[in-house]
Amino acid sequence: MGNKQTIFTAQQLDAYQDCTFFTRKEIIRLFHRYRDLAPQLIPLDYTSGPDVKVPYELIGSMPELKENPFRQRIAEVFSEDGEGNMTLDDFLDMFSVLSEMAPKDLKAYYAFKIYDFNNDDYICKSDLEKTLSQLTRSELSEDESRLVCEKVIDEADLDNDGRLSLDDFQHMIGRAPDFLSTFHIRI
Amino acid sequence: MLATLLLVLSSVSVAVTDLYVPETSARTERALAAAPVPSPTAPLHISEERSDAGIALARSADWHEPAATTDRSEPSHHGGGYKIVQWEWSYVQTPYIIAIWILVASVAKILFHFSQRVTTVVPESCLLILLGLVLGGIVLIANKKQLYQLDPGLFFLFLLPTIVGDAGYFMPSRLFFDNLGAILLYAVVGTLWNAFCTGFSLYGAKLAGMIDEKVEAGMMEFLLFGALISAVDPVAVLAVFEEVHVNETLFIIVFGESLLNDAVTVVLYKVYISFVEVGPGNIHTADYFKGVASFFIVSIGGTVVGLIFALILAFATRFTKRVRIIEPLFVFLLVYLAYLTAELLSLSSILSMTFCGIGCNKYVEANISQKSRTTVKYTMKTLASIAETIIFIFLGISAVDKSKWAWDTGLVSCTLIFIFVFRAMGVVMQTWVLNRFRLVPLDKIDQVVMSYGGLRGAVAFALVVLLDGDHVKAKDYFVATTIIVIFFTVMFQGLTIKPLVKWLKVPRSTSRKPTINEEIHERAFDHILAAVEDIAGLNGYHHWRDKWEQFDKNYLSKLLMRKSVYHKGELWEVYQKINIRDAISLIDQTTQSSAGRKEQGGNVLSSARLSLPSMASRTSFSEVANVTNYLRGNESGVCLDLQVIDMVPSGKVQEETETHHLLTGNLYKPRRRYQAHYSRHFMTVGDKERQDREVFQRNMRSRFESFKSTRHKGKGRHKKDRSQKKRKGSDAKEQDVNGKPRRNVSWQDTAVLNADSEEEKSENSDPEKEEDVGITFVARRADEIPKQGPKSASVSLETCQSPSVMPPSPTCAEKHLPWKGGGGTLPVCVSMETTKIIPIDLQQAWNQSISSLESLASPPVQAEPQHPRVAAICRQEGVRAPGGRFQFPSEEEEDAQSPQQQEMQPLMCSGRPPPQAPLPNQGTGRRPPNFNPCVYLRSLVTAPPPGSEPHSRGPTQL
């Protein structure tokens, strides 16, 4: 226990607690998780708030992730610099969003961000096509993916502007019963 | 009304067997006996038999004696002699009664399902129990004594195994193992908790004076009773839950619990029985430990026995290739033997059978033939269904028995209250513990349904009947209470669980199709979650399963699966299977579409064909003289259901279904998806099968993709095709005038196959193999035929053309000198490109599927009446062709991509009448509007290279 006190100062812990949906214990556990990503990079002492990042190369090269089509996008969305290099704050953020306590709107917002590849705050056709190609491993033909994208937008686009805004997205996702309820991770 | 009908029916059936039959027997015997004059003893004889009649039906052997004596007395009465017809009741008695009972059960089932309204409200099990009560009442009135009851021996040796075997063999194993922790907790801890609490509380109630003094039972007896009454019953749970359709997780937890708690029940029951027998005073502390030890031995031993038999069974089916016919028998025998062996060793037989079924399923299904699979499935379901019916009827009948009416209100009400309360408490406490570990916690509503779904059933009844009345003084009271408890749970809770589930809005297992958005986002979310989990270095949710799968792949599959199956992989087999299926459906569709076209044209082929209006798709069946020809037909869109043909969905619906299909075929599978549903009465297409189909279609699509890209240089071509298609209607007319069934071959389609299509296939199959069981593609229902809407021509073409034929491989000479091939030996035009590229395995698959198709399809009636003409022309043209077009055969042969060369090929086969005239540039399924062979072939010969514009419009030019 004494060990853990030295990782964060009390203020830091309080701040983290305020900013996330976690308890102190969970924060410390998450920190150890984070540190496991790159034990040589991350100091055990965070009291001075060192500016350490786990580079994306490390995350993306994890064997478990190799198959995952969204690995880069997730890292990008949740990292502050937008390039997938994650600080501890980013890491905690990510789990906070995905925790059970997080409100649905927040989850929907982040899900939306993950889809929004070109960061223009709308899911447009190109975003959808990208999503699709990742989901299908680029095995759809142009025609096919266009068809699917048209349908998707047609289905969810409430204001008929040909792209999905966050509102559209939230509405669409809210309609599905157990959609966001499964969008969480137990740490 | 239904009830009265049933009553009449059942009473008649009983009466017939009970009374009428012996009477007639006497009469016939009298009539046929040597002595023509009715002796004065005859009436007496009849009455004698009548009094015996009740016993006549009794299963007990006692009846044999009087029957035999009467039988024997008869001939002596009439002075012996040869009897032409004899009444051999005693000979057929046992099987006859069994058959009659099964018949009654089946007829009852039929009648129940006549009325939709009744069966949707009242579970079948309730109706069956009621019917049993009525039947029992009739028997009781007729005989003053109950002759039938659910005999524990019969129940445990025959009825229960069929149900458990079915449940085990078709257990959705992934769902089961995903929830194994929860199931085990509920089964072991929950049952123990229930047993002890109920037992002790009943004892407390007895001490408190709530239970009458007449019930002579001490603590041990009550504990014994608690043990047998506390176990949730698999039969009842299945019967009720199947009709409620709660979500899969909930169902598997309750059902799994009911299966696995057998070990606990058996051990507790046996321990208590022995304790009761020796008397509470003589129990040593060591005995308690022995009891605990025996629990482990019984449960683990049962499981091990089951797994051993699973191993044997899987191994045995490896070698049944030559004796396919007994494959199903092996499955039944060994699964049943697993049960009996466990029973023999007094281990948990239910556990043994369940695990035998779960364990062997994968390997057996891979080893045995498709037909055996169907046989196993149907036979198991039939047996289980009928066993369940009989169990419930007999439960009803058993209740109508004076000897069991040892009613004690205190005991009954206390038991009912206690089992309900403790079940609820147990569920809540265990769920609380469990939810700390579960990713998706069980919420309150789930808990309510789980506690409410704790149904008791026939197992408890059989166990209580088995009690020894000498040792357990209160046996009669226990029996009566058990019956009441069973009736209450099955009937009251079974009746009310449906409204309850509805009222609580328990998530049901829905068959609603997800919207496209949902479909995409769900997959995406799964991937995202998996990624985050992995980033966090969590010890993957499926860590252990992955380990097991590796072990399975590396060792078990090698040992237990046929070499052929194993080496070629499931994929290959599935591929073959699906080839056949899709080809069949393609035929259906092709015939249908051609029929449709003919109607458009207002003309019909006047050849002898079926003209059943209801079977529109079959009307042109004679046209399918040669199935392989038809396989080459290009118009497609698989249609499996004849009914659907009449349905004309709106454009939007069509598009949506296409999109769905597109997605299901293509979405790359995430790791954690499962959907399984267990039902005895309805056989759904296995998830795996659906998935396999998708994979197949995907494969074929990619093949055609590659073909099209080489052949048509892109998509522009498609649009032309589409515009051509619109002309089809008028084209069809023209064609019908010519009276020629279309024989165009799209063999170019099959011809060019990129070598990478093979690679693509394996690539596609990789995730399929690895992630196998868990992922479900939404099945493509029959009404989801990709219609050839303007937007989706490519989709439907690609998905549905799949089964175009890859013809059998030609000989070497044919390969190199195409014109030397033929001579009628080859059933279809052979494209050398095809045969070169397709690996041998696939060729075999094709060949097999083709041959099976040929046997399936109609016999070659109307065997292409136009052949001679075509052939003649063909020969003419064939002579001309080489001069006109084929100047450099040797060079062109080298060019694998040369379409001309492929087109020329059939012309080269001058010796034989090509059943289909190959159409250049009709690649993606345009029918030639005019099928006059002369014109057609001319156009072929003078055709410019296929890429060129005018040629693609060939038909219209003419």
Image (cartoon, grey):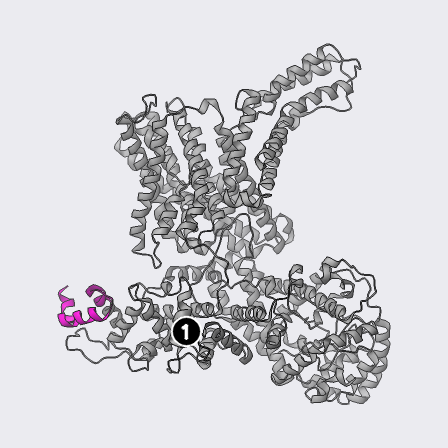
Q: Nearer the viewer, residue B865 or B423?
A: B423
Q: Residue B468's image quarter?
A: top left
Magenta span of residues? A1-29
Chain of the residue under label 1 = A
Tell me the SS state at disc 1. helix
Q: Is residue A11 visible?
A: yes
Quarter of image, res B70: top right
In this image, A52 relative to B598: left or right? left
Q: For residue A22: magenta?
A: yes
**Residue identifier under label 1:** A168
Q: Position of residue B185 (x, y in %)?
A: 34, 48
- In the rendered image, residue B701, in percent from the top left (x then y), is placed at 59, 73
Q: Position of residue A47 (x, y in %)?
A: 15, 75
Is B726 rendered above or below residue B448? Answer: below
Relative vertical location of residue B654 with respect to residue B402 in this rendering, above or below: below
Residue type highlighted by circle 1 = Asp
Question: From the viewer's perspective, is B703 left or right of B854?
Answer: left
Seen from the viewer's position, the closer of residues B687 and B523 is B523
Farthest top residue in view: B40
How many neighbours does mark 1 have within 10 angstroms: few (below 14), some (14-19), or many (20 or more)?
Answer: some
Considering the image in quadrants, where does the C terminus of chain B appear? bottom right
Residue B827 in view: no
- In the image, residue B770 sits, relative to residue B145, either above or below, namely below
